[in-house]
Image (cartoon, grey):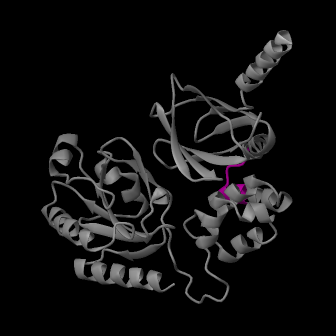
Amino acid sequence: MRKIVFFLTIAICLASCKKKPEFVLQGELQNCSSDEILVVYDDPVSKLDTIILKDGKFTYTFSPDTLTLFRLVSPDMLKTIPVFADKTLHMTLKGSFENPVISGDGENGVYGKFLESLQNLKDSTAITQKAEEFIVQHPHSFVSAYLINDYFVQVPQPDIEKTRSLIEPLGGNIKDSRILSMALKSIPPKDKTERNEKYLTYFSCKNRSGKYVTWSSSENNYTLLNFWASWDKASVSVRDSLAKMVKEFPEKKFRVLNISLDYEKKKWLEACKEDSKQWIEVCDYKGWSNQVVKQNNIHKLPANILIDRNRKVLGKDLTEKDLYTTVEQLIKKEEKK
């Protein structure tokens, strides 16, 4: 009897020690300007992670409970590579962010073959046409959600009707994906007469603690991107006024993300104010070459952009009085819902 109990105990221990099925991503990237890659999770939860490269190589593994969608973001925040993770799936990534070569199981292999089909295409119109063909032929593929976002939504002049027609036939679970839900929010309703709403392109940056700060991880309803520099007295004055004003609003309703155009870390840190949930200081020491600055055509200081949690632009270069009134009205409107 004791032997039976002993062997049962051993069997239970072995079963409990058995590793859960893992997703494995193996990569070898060329010409990567950083040894750190940002990982942005889209589904089923939104979160951030990082991958550390060693001579361009890395292995990223975890045990997903269900199909998990995330993106690898290039160091300059301009390029992304979607990844489709599930138990036992494998994916291999080679090449670069500009020209990724992907192989693997499931949706990863499907996306890899799509990229192969673009290799001989040089014209952007032909590439967009190829993406459209894929979406029409794969209405139940999560790859289609990412292609719609990349080729039809995150473009300078999106074709609203074309985008709507591509989304309509997609499967319900594809439409419900976070990446496509965000894209849908950027498309005005059919009965909307004003169609000039603008949304900020995805961006991410690090605070003074080295942690990534993104609009998508914010609990705040509204965020003011405040552009300033320690060498610009006018922008410093505006920033000082904002530091007082932000405290007049609830912590979870409004925050200020101060994006500095400083080139020197020492001077930036000396001019910074203490961080809080409502007040965040960031700087990449690239000055006017900062990606958010370039993407939004910021050519002078001071400057600001007010956005909501979905990155919809609510105002630009607002005066302190106009900003206060706008945020106050937006919060009151939210509370009435």
- The residue shown at (28%, 50%) is 287
- The residue shown at (45%, 82%) is 335
- The residue shown at (22%, 68%) is 242
Image quadrant where residue 186 sits: bottom right
Is residue 38 placed above or below 95 in the rendered structure? below
Question: Where residue 177 appears, x then y in whole percent?
Answer: 69, 60
| 86 or 266: nearer the viewer | 86
Which quadrant does the N terminus fall into? top right
Question: Does the segment drawn in magenta span residue 121?
Answer: yes
Is residue 296 placed above or below 26 in the rendered structure? below
Is residue 192 placed above or below 260 in the rendered structure? below
| 210 or 10: nearer the viewer | 10
Q: Is residue 48 left or right of residue 22?
A: left
Question: Range of the magenta residues?
Answer: 120-128
- The residue shown at (22%, 41%) is 265
Is residue 281 placed above or below 248 in the rendered structure? above
Most extreme residue toward the front is 1
Image quadrant where residue 96 sits: top right
Question: Where residue 304 appears, x then y in whole percent?
Answer: 31, 68
